[in-house]
Image (tube, rainbow, N blue to C red):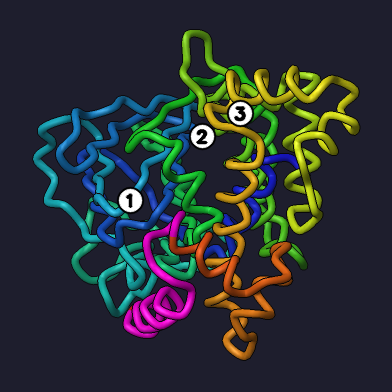
Amino acid sequence: MDAFSDLIRGVRAHGSLFGASTLSPPWALHFVDGAPLTLCTVLSGAGWIVPEHRPPEPLRARETIVVRGPATFTFVDEVGTRAEPIACGEHCATPEQGGTRHRRGWNDPGEDDCGGDAGDAGGVGYAGDAGGAGYAGDAGDGRGATTLIVGAYPVRGEISRRLLDALPVVLRVESGGTADAVLDHLAAEVSVDTPGQQVVLDRLLDWMLVCTLREWFDRPGGEPPAWWAAQRDPVVGDALRLLHAEPAAPWTVAALADHTGVSRSTLAKRFADLVGEPPLTYLTRWRMTLAADLLVERQAATVADIARTVGYSDPFGFSAAFKRVRGINPSEFRRTATTLTGLRN
């Protein structure tokens, strides 16, 4: 398991809702839920992403923009559009709430696509906090119409939050990269209604997000997080994979050095230079991140159980390390996180 795979494994599309409508100018779709991560890509046409408190970003055909919440954003035909913003959130795909008439992956240009206040601005199906996607299809004659796909991703837990911390509020990836092949599959899949389509669309959105983040991390002149660049190093990359594959193992610098085929001093210096901290410090922080999620997910497990799961035979030593890294002891963290989760639900 590599670091990126570990961090992104909890960021998954699920239960995507696809709507059918024509986005003909003018339009303004205000995505109000502030999802932790929202992916926007245009299959045809163009528009502008206007993030809250950020400058507008043009979004042309086959380009992708990822917006990091909790700030909201608007998709408009042009900056300063005369269209009244249509609030798109978890009820946006419900006709009774003013959203798009929809079916999953289905486009029927003969239907009245927008209900309620959506009017001529067009609508979008959007799955809100449940994760998923919206689709605004070209259901008209194609003149000035824009085809938009929006994938909203819930990000729960401390593991995936480390990925969010490495991203800016808005990142963009131009066309011509590895994500183009995914766009072709998405375009083909949303045009038909076949068994298993929901699973296919969810997985395509996940694939799209992975390709987009890879492109952005590897962009010329970019400043990717240290762990991303370090994965390419033949020595430090191997050490990182070992720590992520077996975080509970009794690792020492000497053991890591033996596995990577270098001396202890070489590994220690190379790791610190590329990752920004010593290998065992990195391991401790990663163990505490894993433990934080386990404390919430496994309510029946004791602190001692969690300690053993992440490599500590002594629960007191684990509690001390957890408080040193996270500023709060494990029991207090569990109570606070469980209360917040209950309030969100």
Circle 2 residue: 43
Circle 1 residue: 69
Q: Which residues are magenta?
A: 324-343
| Rendered residue at 47%/15% (across/down) | 222
Judged from this view, the residue extending furthest toward the top is 221
Residue 238 on image: x %, y %: 80, 30
Q: Earlier in the sequence, mark 1 or mark 2?
A: 2
Left or right: 145 as drawn, with respect to 117? right
For badge 1, the amino acid type reads Gly
Q: Earlier in the sequence, mark 1 or mark 3?
A: 1
Circle 3 residue: 228
- The quarter of the rendered structure image containing the C terminus is bottom left
| 277 over 157 or under it: above or below | above
Residue 308 lies in the magenta stretch: no
For badge 2, the amino acid type reads Leu
Q: Which quadrant would residue 337 be assigned to in this image? A: bottom left
